[in-house]
Image (cartoon, rainbow, N blue to C red):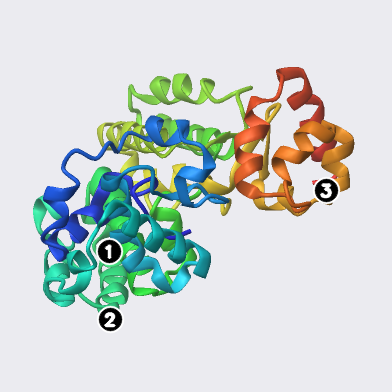
Amino acid sequence: MPIDQTNDTGFATLRVLIQRYTGLKDMCKTAELDPAVFEKLSDNCFAWPGERRYPIHNKEQTALSLAYSKIASKHLPSDVSSSLEKAAKMYGISADLFAHPVMDKKAFLEFWLLPNKKRFRVASSDDVKIAENILHEKYAQLSVYDRAEAFLQLHKAAEHYEVALTPSTEKLAGFTITSTQILKDWIEARQTAAIKLGSELASAYDLLAAKYRGVKPYITQREDQIKIAALLNELDKKSGVNQFYGKSILDPLRTVFNTEKLANDALDLGGYTFSIKKLASLPSTFWSDVLGSDIMREIAPDGNVKISALKEVLPTLPKDLKLVLGRQLAAYR
């Protein structure tokens, strides 16, 4: 899914756009970028209503959406581009705002994977693969937070330049969910290693592992995942367990991002986690039988189940219905 202001984590792409289109900052300095605001908007407030992307409910948001669309133009349906053009005309946004951008290459001279430290610059598609290789080479020298940030920014650069990254890189970018069972197993492995080393922190690992017994099978929030990785990193250093990285113990990030399942594709139903894309591929008759005709009209207004509608509707179902639905689907997963 192309990046816009609704899913631009850390607004790294926005910083690049402001550098590229010099008039954008002044025009959009009062734009509200709180996710809660976007969630309250109706579908017709977006140029891409089916995916709820590219807000056009006011002049500031339309200008931002147009800027983001310049990066994602190759991936946008024609009707989305048309809606953006109509909105720009309605709000009187001149095409001159985007007609003469600061040189593309120059704008990306300040695109750093670690911007606060000015490290790992990416200014071309070739740089993406070079940076990917360097990050893996320098991996052990980076802090947990720097690793997470650098791989996340690399993912954004790769999307911009349309460069494919390896699955292991995508994992480290934090786009996969955490299996709590696998997480618990690796924490217990650390406890065993700490005991062998005679570390007093062995009991701390035991307490941490206990938190993931009998809980939901997956952790999907990146912020929570990074906090766990940071805690493990601290414990590993103090206990000496970090000496086993790459041998009998996975490092903290790989311990946490331990599945191939994408976080933005996960949906919880009664304690069971499913791929939203797979749910959307189920026949419409299934959803009609389970949820009834009224809800069916919400998730499939034209007869075809919409991913965005499922994401919006399924979490609002009554708890008992989600539990039954989750159990039924799990039997056929």
Q: Are marks 1 and 3 in contact (CB under 8 Å)?
A: no
SS type, badge 1: helix
Residue 81: x and y, percent? 44, 65
Q: Residue at x 24, y 77 (%)?
A: 124
Q: Residue at x 65, y 33 (%)?
A: 313
Nearer the observer, 187 or 285: 285
Query: Where does label 2 land, which residue?
Result: 126
Q: Quadrant of residue 153?
A: bottom left
**Taking 297 as reference, is 120 left or right?**
left
Q: Residue at x 60, y 36 (%)?
A: 312
SS type, badge 3: helix
Q: Residues within 10 Å of mark 3 (few under 14, many from 20)?
A: some
**Taking 126 as reference, is 262 left or right?**
right
SS type, badge 2: helix
Nearer the observer, 313 or 56: 56
Query: Where does label 1 land, which residue?
Result: 135
Q: Are marks 1 and 2 in contact (CB under 8 Å)?
A: no
Query: Where does label 3 land, which residue?
Result: 284
Q: Nearer the viewer, mark 1 or mark 3?
A: 3
Q: Nearer the viewer, mark 3 or mark 2?
A: 3
Calculate the distance from the C-alpha at mark 1 to the C-alpha at mark 3. 45 Å
Give whichever of discs 3 and 2 has the lower sequence position.
Answer: 2
Q: Is residue 3 above or below residue 82?
A: above
Q: Which amino acid, mark 1?
A: Leu
**Taking 9 as reference, is 211 left or right?**
right
Give whichever of discs 1 and 2 has the lower sequence position.
Answer: 2
Residue 316: x and y, percent? 64, 25
Q: Nearer the viewer, mark 1 or mark 2?
A: 2
Calculate the distance from the C-alpha at mark 1 to the C-alpha at mark 2. 15 Å
